[in-house]
Image (spheres, rainbow, N blue to C red):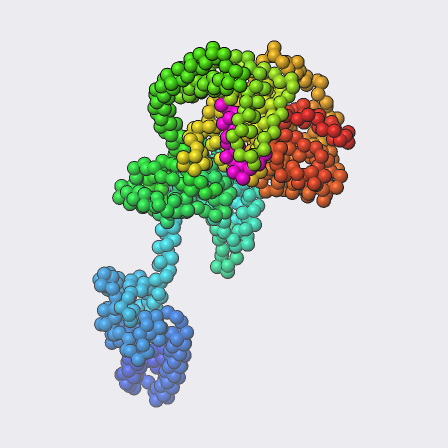
């Protein structure tokens, strides 16, 4: 018995054995063929010629069949190697030849003409750090009888960089299990490795994030829930995953989820959306949410990723800081290194005269607020902030919106986490500056008082012999004409002595001698001085009520008050004009008193001094009574005249009102309390129930002074009227257009911003020619009153008006009467 390649061949059956070998599945190799031929020769006489020829024929057919199968297999292999994007290699382990497909040049960037590496140079392409490991894994796979091998390592490209590849191969062995061939393919997994690494890192970030990172589908069902979400909302992942996100949303905010899902389904994101959410315990927390859509490989949106950050504590601290800033009496300003003012509190904007809306629409810059000559101060402060983080407080001025200047104390510092931004505290020094000036003036007054005391002593010494000498002259039996001259001199001397006392009273606060006084003689004396000493182009008109009441006053001081006012009126009319001096009894009611703080209801003697001079600008009205304040040229005014007037009137328990309009003149009203047991004491205070009442008529009151609007509205409502108010003429026109058929009377001031009284009256006449109008003004000589008359207005109120005057004129105009009630 013989054997071949492990197949037994028995005697007498050699031919069958050869045929069996030739037809063996899988064909035979060239070596098998040689062995078969040897076997045939060895068989010799055992095989007949016929059988040998038959065996050869069968063997040739098998050979051809095997070669055809091999060609077809090689063709399929070549086509597959060309079609794939992977790198295909074929390593003959017997000859150590290495074959590469075209994918090698494409994947690694080598030109087609460059010969791929051999098995020896192939190892040079592997990253040095990976080479030993890869060689070991290949050797183990071959030596251990494995059918396949795979590994991942770094392979060098043509530009010297390395890519990550996944290499795998099949090991082909012969009948004795000896490895003869290895065929494999390489894939570039660089991007996959990066994606995997990114995904791994992302998973780690999601897992460890303190923020809540939540996944949900398009129905709002929670699909993922990280540890941050557990900490913020209190739910464990296993108890909330698969439930609706709506369980976290308060009842009054459920529509938010529909809005969010709508945007996500359209592929839109939501950036930093601040809202409120519920925890497991039912506690409301403030959260900042960012939502992004999640899409599948085809680009279809399948869900959303939501990041929620708990900002409850941040909001609490922010609210406290905002409350601290907004409630601060000092101005608080936020700035940056570009000189921009990024934010500020109400105290700051009130100081500067701006509103938040104005600043939001047009942000302010530091240099707009700073006078040019003070810019160096700011530059030095900025340099100090850069060096140390803050600057020493320093005084400067800001320019308000209206152009006026505001003295301030500024302290600034940069933020530690961002030196390009900082905070600035602004302290208004206006009152402190005033106090400093008042202190300086008090020192000056003290000096003046000391000087006045010495002058008064000397003047009294000079006047004493004159007074005594005049007394002696009267004893010499002078004729009537000479006696009159002496008496005039004596009266003037006495007035001079009284004036010395007045100087002492003003400088040292010495009270004068007050007695019950009727003002008519003093007014007549002032009239005589004006007529004899003032320019002839100043025309004086005096009007004294016949039943003028008595006041408790110092005659010399009242004389000085009237003389000061007349001199000021003269100076205000350098080209001449009209000067009117009127004295009358008045009754001040509660409305008039409320409109003027410090005034009490009751009977008064009113002194009015009206001129047609240049008037006083509105911005100076509040300053004219300040000591040493004057608009006159140096040497032509001391600034003490009106401060003396105010001091004397107030010391008598009275008060002063001023009404002025530039170019139209001024009116000074002095109210002195009347004695109740004097003449004119029977002027009764009208009782509220005796004043005329309305019957529900609607009155529109137009005035730019809020206090006047409020008290007039309260008074009219108390007496049965309905009231609507407007702060300027433009607003009044709009209100009248809406309520034209309801408004019975319009009571309007003549001097207002935006649209003045005459313009308003003209506009109302166009809307309704029959509209009934009452015009109010503080100036009898106001040109606006004349314009109102030309527009058909016949009813006027002098400001400030009393409730009695207003109600009486309303009664007249509503009854279509034409008479005009008495006015204050």
Q: Which quadrant of the figure has residue 503?
A: top left
At x 32%, y 36%, the residue is 393
Task: State the predominant SS element of the stretch in magenta.
Answer: helix
In the displayed structure, 255 sits above or below 327; it is below
Residue 573 magenta: yes
Which quadrant is home to the N terminus?
Answer: bottom left
Up the image or down, 272 lies above or below 320; here it is below
- 586 vs 318, left or right, is right
Closer to the camera, 297 or 431?
431
Q: Which residues are magenta?
A: 560-578
On the image, the x and y values in percent for residue 131 come to: 23, 63
Q: Position of residue 399 (x, y in %)?
A: 42, 42
> Looking at the image, can residue 498 be seen?
no
Q: Residue at x 29, y 86 (%)?
A: 45
- Residue in front for this viewpoint, 68 or 79: 79
Image: 419 above or below 250? below
- Give 761 or 779, whichever is nearer the viewer: 779
Q: Which quadrant holds residue 84?
A: bottom left
In the rendered image, residue 634, in percent from the top left (x then y), is placed at 40, 36
């Amino acid at each position: 018995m013989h054997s071949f390649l492990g197949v037994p061949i028995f005697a007498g059956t050699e031919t069958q054995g050869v045929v069996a070998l030739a037809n063996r599945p899988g064909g035979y190799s060239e070596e098998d063929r040689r062995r078969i031929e040897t076997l045939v020769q060895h068989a010799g006489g055992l095989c007949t010629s016929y059988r040998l020829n038959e065996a050869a024929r069968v063997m040739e057919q098998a050979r051809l069949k095997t070669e055809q199968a091999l060609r077809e297999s090689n063709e399929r292999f070549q086509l597959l190697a060309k079609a794939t994007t992977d790198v295909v290699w074929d390593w003959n382990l017997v000859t150590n030849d290495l074959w590469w497909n075209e994918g090698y040049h494409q994947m690694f960037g080598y030109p087609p003409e460059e010969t791929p590496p051999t098995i020896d140079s192939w190892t040079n392409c592997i990253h040095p750090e990976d080479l030993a490991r890869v060689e070991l894994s290949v050797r183990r796979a071959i030596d251990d009888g494995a059918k396949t091998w795979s590994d991942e390592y770094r392979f060098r490209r043509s530009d010297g960089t390395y890519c990550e590849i996944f290499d795998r191969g099949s090991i082909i062995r012969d009948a004795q299990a000896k490895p003869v061939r290895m065929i494999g393919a390489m894939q570039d997994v660089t991007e996959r490795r990066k994606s995997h690494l990114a995904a791994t890192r992302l998973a780690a970030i999601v897992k460890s994030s303190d923020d809540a990172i939540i996944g949900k589908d398009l129905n709002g069902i929670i699909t993922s829930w990280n540890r941050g979400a557990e900490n913020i909302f209190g739910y464990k992942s296993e108890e909330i995953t698969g439930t609706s996100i709506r369980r976290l949303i308060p009842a009054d905010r459920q529509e938010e989820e529909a809005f969010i899902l709508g945007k996500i389904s359209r592929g839109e994101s939501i950036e930093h959306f601040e809202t409120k959410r519920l925890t497991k315990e039912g506690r409301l927390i403030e959260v900042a949410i960012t939502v992004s859509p999640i899409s599948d490989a085809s680009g279809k949106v399948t869900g959303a990723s939501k990041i929620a950050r708990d900002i409850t504590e941040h909001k609490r601290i922010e609210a406290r800081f905002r409350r601290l800033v907004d409630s601060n009496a000092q101005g608080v300003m936020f700035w940056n290194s570009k000189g921009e003012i990024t934010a500020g509190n109400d105290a700051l904007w009130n100081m500067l005269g701006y509103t938040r809306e104005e600043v939001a629409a047009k942000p302010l810059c530091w240099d707009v607020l700073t006078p040019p000559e003070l810019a160096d101060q700011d530059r030095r402060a900025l340099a100090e902030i850069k060096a140390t983080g803050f600057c020493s407080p320093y005084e400067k001025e800001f320019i308000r919106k209206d152009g006026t200047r505001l003295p301030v104390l500024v302290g600034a510092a940069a933020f530690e986490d961002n030196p390009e931004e900082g905070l600035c505290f602004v302290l208004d020094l206006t009152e402190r500056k005033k106090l400093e000036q008042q202190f300086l003036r008090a020192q000056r007054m003290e000096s003046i008082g000391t000087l006045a005391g010495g002058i008064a002593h000397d003047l009294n010494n000079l006047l004493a012999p004159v007074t005594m000498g005049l007394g002696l002259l009267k004893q010499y039996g002078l004729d009537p004409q000479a006696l009159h001259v002496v008496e005039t001199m004596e009266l003037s001397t006495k007035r001079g002595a009284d004036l010395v006392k007045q100087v002492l009273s003003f400088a040292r606060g010495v009270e004068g001698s007050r007695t019950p006084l009727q003002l008519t003689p003093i007014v007549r004396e002032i009239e005589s001085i004006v007529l004899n000493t003032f320019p002839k182009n100043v025309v004086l008109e005096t009007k004294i009520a016949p039943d003028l009441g008595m006041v408790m006053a110092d005659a010399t001081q009242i004389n000085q008050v009237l003389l000061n006012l007349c001199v000021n009126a003269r100076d205000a009319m350098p080209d001449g004009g009209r000067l009117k001096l009127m004295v009358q009894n008045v009754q001040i009611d509660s409305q008039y008193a409320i409109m003027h703080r410090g005034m009490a209801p009751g009977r008064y003697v009113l002194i009015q001094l009206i001129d047609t001079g240049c008037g006083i600008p509105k911005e100076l009205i509040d300053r004219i009574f300040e000591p040493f304040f004057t608009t006159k040229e140096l040497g032509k005014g001391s600034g003490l005249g009106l401060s003396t007037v105010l001091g004397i009137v107030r010391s008598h328990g009275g008060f002063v009102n001023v009404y002025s309009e530039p170019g139209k003149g001024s009116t000074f009203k002095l109210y002195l309390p009347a004695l109740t047991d004097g003449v004119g004491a029977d002027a009764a205070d009208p009782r509220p129930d005796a004043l005329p009442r309305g019957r529900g008529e609607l009155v529109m009151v137009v005035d730019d002074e809020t206090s006047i609007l409020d008290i007039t509205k309260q008074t009219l409502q108390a007496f049965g009227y309905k009231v609507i108010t407007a702060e300027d003429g433009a607003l009044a026109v709009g209100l009248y257009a809406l309520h034209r058929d309801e408004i019975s009377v319009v009571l309007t001031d003549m001097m207002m911003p935006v649209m003045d009284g005459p313009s308003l009256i003209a506009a109302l006449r166009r809307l309704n020619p029959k509209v009934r109008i009452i015009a109010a003004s503080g100036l009898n000589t106001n040109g606006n009153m004349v314009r109102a008359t030309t527009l058909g207005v016949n009813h006027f109120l002098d400001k400030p008006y009393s409730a009695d005057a207003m109600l009486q004129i309303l009664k007249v105009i509503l009854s279509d009467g034409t008479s005009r009630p008495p006015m204050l």
